[in-house]
Every structure is written in C-alpha cells, then in structure tokens.
Amino acid sequence: MLAERIKPRNIKRRQMILQEGFVCKHYTFVEKGCFKMYGIDEKGTEHNLMFAAENDWVADLGSFYSGKPSKLFIEAIEPSTILQIEKQDLLYLFVNSPKFDRNFRVIVEEKFIELQNRLLQNFSSNAEQRYVDFLEQYTELASRLPNTQIASYLGITPEFLSKIRKNRVLK
Amino acid sequence: MINQSILQTKKIEMEATKQFFNQFVQFINTADEDLAQQLISPAASFHVPFQADPLQGPKGYLTIIGMMRNGFPDIQWSIEEMIAENDKVAVRFTMKGTHKGTFFNVPATGKQIAVSAMNFYRLSENQIIEEVGQPDLLGLLTQIGAVPAM
C-alpha cells in the first residue's frame, strides 16, 4: 500500500525540493543525505529552521496542508536520495492504515517537541548553550555540516561560532 | 598519465552534464514543478526574445513554458547537439508541436511546427543560473502562416 504511493528521487547537492512561492506538495523521507529547511529575510540572510538527514522526514507542513505557497526552501546539503509522498496519498494512508497513522503522528509529535525545545532555547539560552544543545540534538550530523550552516541555525555569525568552538577547546 | 586523468575527469563531467540536461528536457516537456524547483536556481535569469527584462527563477521559466504550451499544448523539445565548457553549456534543440492555441496573437491553425532553438546555459552548483534563449521564431511564425514563406 505504501510502496505504490511513494516516489524515489535523487537530488544533487544545492538542488532544492521546495522553493519559496511554490506549494509544498510532498512529505519527504530522507533515505540518504542531508537537507536544510530555511527562510530568507528581507535583508537576504538565510535562517536555517531545521536539518533533515537519514531517516528524517521534512516538509513545510503549513504549505503542505493549506495548499498555500511556501515561504521556505528545502535544499540538499549533500547528494541525497529521498522518498516522497503526495498529500492525497498520505491522507489515504492515514485513513486506511491505522498503524501508519499512529507512527506518523508520533513522528510529527516528536518534531513538534524538538521545535518547542528550540523555541525555549532561543528565549532562555546564550549562544554557547544553544550550540551545546545543537550538538546533543544533531550529534552525528554536526560533523557533516559546514560552520556557516550551523551558525545560521543558531542565529549567530560563523565568526562567533568559531570563537565559541575555540573557547570550548581551550576549557 | 596526467592527460589520461584530465580526459577521464572531462568524460565524467560531460556525462553529468548530459544527465542534467536529460532531466531538464523532461522538465520542459512536462512543465513539472518539482523538476523546476530542483534544476533551476531561485536566482536564475532567463533572457528571451521580445522581452527586455529577463524572467527570474523557476517561476519565470514556467511562464515561458506555459506560453509555449498555450499555443502548442503538445510541444516537445529534443536535444540535437550539446557542447559544454566549464560552467557554460550550449544546446541546440528541435521543438515540435501543433498550433492549437493563440500564439503571438495568431489564432490556432492546427498546423505542425518543427523549429530549432539555440540556448546557452550557465550552471552553478547543479542548477541553471542563467539562460539566453534563441528560438527560431521566424521559422515558427512562418510555419503557422503568420509570416509569408520566403
């Protein structure tokens, strides 16, 4: 039931599976590789919202369910292999496969918890603590990501991130 | 030994370029929005005849394709020849289709067209960043009877 409704794709580094202005039509499972989901502010600065690597799901949920154009980009940081499912197929599986429905709900709830934690960190933690939390959340991924991407995720400059890392080594 | 290595690298790069443009042809022949977002940079510029300002990004390209598909709903492009050097690729296409919609203010005639297009692309990080398109519009307009044959 699932296999016939998913579409595999190979995406090269820097290629995108979602651009601003397009409706997010797929929920994407990352089989191999890594993506970043980000928005660009009025000054042209990128702000990474999240990373998605092996066994992660990624989508602009707001656009996916509302059918409205996204304000986000989802871009491959590494050459990637993905599986994609369209909205009508996902809804079909929710209705016809209670097990899939439950598993998917758990996945989304876990992502929501991550987002809540991140919001709390942004309000209450300094940059160094946010970096430590990032390393805990993305343990395996941290070594694969360029400094610029991690800095964007933390909302700091790459130079400040280098300073934080240097200070941690010296401690 | 070094020459062999350079040749091998060039061969791999050309193969990658061919694969990219095979996907690109699939995109322009289907107007697939997924492929548009994948293959075209949001910062891409498309220079087309009769348009002073270039069109931008995948939406801009979809506008061009939409214009062609409005006039020729079955239009298909095929690659005849391709030359690549560094980040630039020159492609000669044949465009074929049936004039079933208004195109350049010419109402549908039902006539078949087959014309060339010479396009020059610049690629950056696995996406198209720039295109200069030169379709044979004179040939096309002649074939649909908008311009007398010479």
Image (cartoon, grey):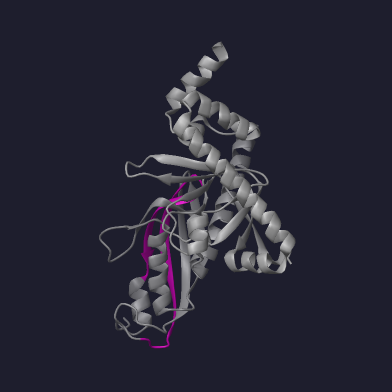
Outermost residue to the top: A170
| Location of residue B86 in the rendering, given as x and y in whole percent from the top left corner | 48, 43
Task: Decide which of A48, A80 is in the foreground and name it.
Answer: A48
Which quadrant does the N terminus of chain B fall into?
A: top right
Instruction: Kindly tell me whether residue B2 is visible in this rendering.
Output: no
Is residue A77 in the magenta section? no
A117 vs B48: above or below: above
Please say whether residue A65 is visible from this viewpoint: yes
Q: Residue at x 58, y 65 (%)?
A: A87
Residue pictured at 36% horizontal, 44% vertical:
A41
Residue A93 in which image quadrant: bottom right
Q: Is residue B128 magenta?
A: yes
Comparing A158 with B115, the one in front is A158
Where residue A76 appears, x then y in whole percent? 55, 46
Above or below: residue B64 compared with residue A148: below
- The part of the chain drawn in magenta is B108-136
Residue at 42% over, 86% down: B111
The quarter of the displayed image where residue A145 is located: top right
* Image point (48%, 40%), residue name: A48
Left or right of A20: which side holds A104?
A: right
Residue found at the far left of this picture: B52
The C terminus of chain B, quarter of image = bottom left
Task: Indicate the position of residue B76 as horizontal and vertical percent values.
Answer: 50, 72
Image-quadrant location for residue A104 = bottom right
Q: Nearer the viewer, residue A121 or A18?
A: A121
